[in-house]
Image: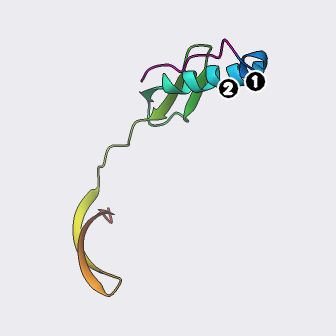
Amino acid sequence: MAEIEKYTEGALAKTKKANEMIDAINRLLQMRFETIESSEPPEVEFSDNNVVLRIPEAPDLVNYSDFAVTMCVNGSPVSKVILVKDAT
């Protein structure tokens, strides 16, 4: 996504806050996502150029099984598949 340009003329250009907000939004527009070990806590890294959000990888789905169910939603049957942890 293209960066937002700073104000250079007019009343808004005279206030630093508007351009500070534009800088902050531009960093969010450049956000990156990275995965880390599933045992690590999530992290957020802020810099002058971007934001990096590091999220744990999903754990291996060992000892889980798919289970088909029919639920009642607003009076109508709806078929879904849920993930169920095995009893082992």
Q: Main secondary structure of the magenta part?
A: loop
Region rendered in magenta: 1-9
Q: Mark 1 to mark 2: distance in Å?
A: 6 Å
**Residue found at the far bottom of this picture:** 75
Q: Please give the name of the residue rendered at 44% of the width and 36% of the height, measured from the top-left corner.
A: 38
Q: Report crowding for label 2: few under 14, some 14 to 19, many 20 or more residues within 10 A (C-alpha).
A: few
Quadrant hosting residue 86: bottom left
Residue 69 image point, x, y percent: 24, 75
Asked whether the residues under the numbered discs 1 and 2 touch, taking CB atoms below 8 Å apart as contact, a structural biologist would say yes
Task: Say which amino acid is labelled 2.
Answer: Met
Task: Say which amino acid is labelled 1.
Answer: Lys
Residue annotated with mark 2? 21
Residue 70 image point, x, y percent: 24, 78
Q: Which mark is residue 17?
A: 1
Residue 33 image point, x, y percent: 44, 28
Residue 59 appears in the rendering: yes
Quadrant hosting residue 4: top right
Residue 85 appears in the rendering: no
